[in-house]
Image (spheres, helix red, strand yellow):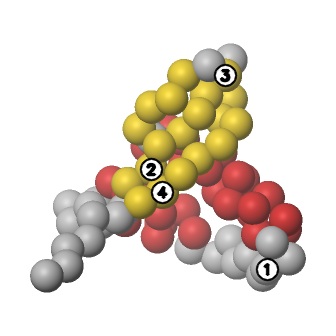
Amino acid sequence: MTIRYAKEADIEQIIELCEEHAIYEKSNFEKDNKKEKLFKYLFGSKKVLYCIVIELNERLLGYATFMKQFST
């Protein structure tokens, strides 16, 4: 098992995990433009979202996202 930062190639599996999470939480999940939005925030020029994944045998088992925030 490996814990690492997400790579661009992980986006499809991350979306699958997001959908599974939404189902568990009994929330709506919109796949429309999800790949483009995630790519923009995770890997775009103004990166604002970070993602760590857990991988086993080239399959993602879980993920965690976080953002840098500042307070006074």
Alpha carbons under labels 3 and 2: distance apart: 16 Å
Q: Earlier in the sequence, mark 3 or mark 2?
A: 2
Q: Mark on residue 27?
A: 1
Where residue 66 sits, quadrant-wise, is bottom left
Q: Are marks 1 and 2 in contact (CB under 8 Å)?
A: no
In the rendered view, would you say 11 is above or below 39?
Answer: above
Alpha carbons under labels 1 and 3: distance apart: 27 Å
In the rendered view, would you say 10 is above or below 70?
Answer: above
Q: Mark on residue 51?
A: 2
Residue 23 visible in the shown view: yes
Q: Mark on residue 65?
A: 4
Q: Earlier in the sequence, mark 1 or mark 2?
A: 1
Q: Mark 1 is on which residue type?
A: Ser
Q: Residue at x 47, y 63 (%)?
A: 38
**Which residue corresponds to mark 3?**
56
User: Tag 1: Cα neighbours inside 10 Å, few (<14), some, or many (≥20)?
Assistant: few
Q: Secondary structure at mark 4?
A: strand
